[in-house]
Amino acid sequence: MVSVRWNLTPISAAANTIDSWWIHNPAQPSNILWNYHRNTYGENVVYDDFITGFSGAKFNASQWINLFHDAGAKYFVIVTKHHDGFALFDTEDTTHRSSVHLGPKRDFLGELMSAAKEEHPDMKRGTYYSMPEWFNPAFKKYGFGNWPGGLARNAYNASKWEPYTGYIEGKDYLRDIQEAHMKILAEKYETDIMWCDIGGPNRTIEFASQWYNDAIKQNRQVAMNNRCGVAPDFDTPEYARFSSIQTKAWETNEGIDPYSYGYNRQTRDEDYRSAEAIIHSLVDIVSKNGNYLLNLGPTGEGEIIPAMVERLMEVGHWLSHSGECIYNTTYSFPGAEEKNLRFTTTPEAFCIISFSKPQEAFTDGGAAGPSSHDEVLQVQDPHSHDQQAPWEIYPVDGGSEEDDQGDPFKPRRGHALLVVERPVPILPRDDIYLLGGSGKPLKWKFKGNRLGIFVPTQELDRVSHAWAFKVEYA
């Protein structure tokens, strides 16, 4: 559920994400990032000069892992090497372009994986890995499109070549770098999720055949996305939303920063995605058979800033009481959504999640006169010959037909009505609960393929952002 993009980007970025590729394309004044780099750092500063500023001085693996856990994440994916070729793990002698050999000389991936194993062993550990590199000389023979390989010419003086610090001569990119790195991530760091990016030329068949067989022997469950080239377990459309259920497993990813995956110093605290927006995205995606991967961009020192932490903690609080309708659920065959409602299901329960707080519907003390009370209950029933037939409000099918005082139940002031206008798998002895509420079963009525749930407003006030109603089968 949480991904982390942490590389040289936050050292160089401010106006937006500035990677080595973007200041070169095009390398001319019409490129705002080219201008920003020149005006901020000067024409003599090249991308690799930022390696010395990548300190990781505030990086604390335990803090990161506990934050992911408190945010409700069941898995994380960290960028181990992006398109710039700078890795956060021990690349051994495949290349020395990594944080182990350069800059801070620390194995950040090793620290993070160890902390996860020790503190939250049930959390799945994933590794993002860019299959190509923009300017690796060894990739030139395999280059394509925006990943040409070969050294970059200086963005301000085309007669000069920019360095590729840490590069080791004489390597075949696919065999000695790409495949070797994937094996290191699988064997040394024991990744559970191989999250590749871009695709292109690869030796994934050779890697995967061994990895999957080893996982079976170790009784481990591992997965690989569709960008590795072959044998995908799930698809990964970016910033994607679907209007209907996708029966093939999928995961979408997006940044908590709406403008960038990497840390952007110009993004204001109030511009980050709100906890409510994150929760709504999560619910919508899960209801359509997807997973939601929310990306964080730490600073160059390795700090996840307070604005991000606050949102993650708020999401985690919601999941702590409503996660039953998210974790280990699947989609509902009749459809994933109805207006602002989303649906998920398990073998033991059915969930209705409302993006808006049901409003108080009973304001007349329970009298059945012409009032807002009647306006809510006089719903059109397409299965009835009498199109003006009122929705009966008592006796109520769900739970007891008496209120707390032993009197016949009838909604009154302080109650809201949530109406679900689609078939719901519910039987008379089933109970409905508001997750995060008092834990008491709610009154409900099923009529004409509509489910009406009567909710005390004080129950609704216990919850924020999204209201998850769990139909618990008897």
Image: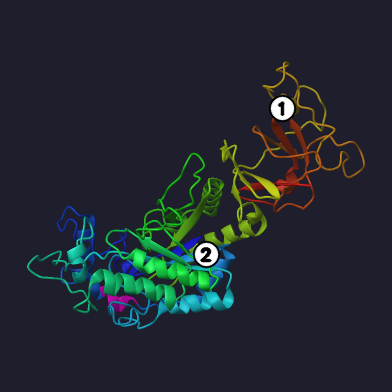
| Left or right side of 236 for 403 | right
Q: Secondary structure at mark 2?
A: strand
Colour pattern of the rendering: rainbow
Specify few, some or many for label 2: CA neighbours under 10 Å numbering under 14, 14-19, or 20 or more. Answer: some
Disc 1 packing (10 Å; few <14; some 14–19; many ≥20): some
Residue 178 horizontal/vertical position (percent):
30, 70
Q: In the image, what residue type sits under mark 2?
A: Tyr
- Magenta segment, which residues? 50-54
Q: Quadrant of residue 337?
A: top right
Residue 218 visible in the displayed image: yes
Q: Secondary structure at mark 1?
A: loop
Q: Does residue 52 belong to the magenta stretch? A: yes
Q: What type of secondary structure mainly makes up the magenta span?
A: helix
- The location of residue 304, given as percent across then percent down, is 46, 68
Q: Position of residue 219 (x, y in %)?
A: 55, 71
Q: Of label 2 and label 1, which has the lower sequence position?
A: 2
* Residue 166 place in picture, x, y as percent: 24, 79
Q: Amino acid at mark 1?
A: Gly
Which residue reaches farthest right?
406
Give the residue drawn at x 67%, y 51%. 463
Separation of marks 2 and 1 at Cα, in angstroms: 42 Å
Residue 469 seen from this side: no
Mark 1, residue position: 448
Reading the image, the residue beneath label 2 is: 75
**Viewer-closest of 448 and 339:** 448
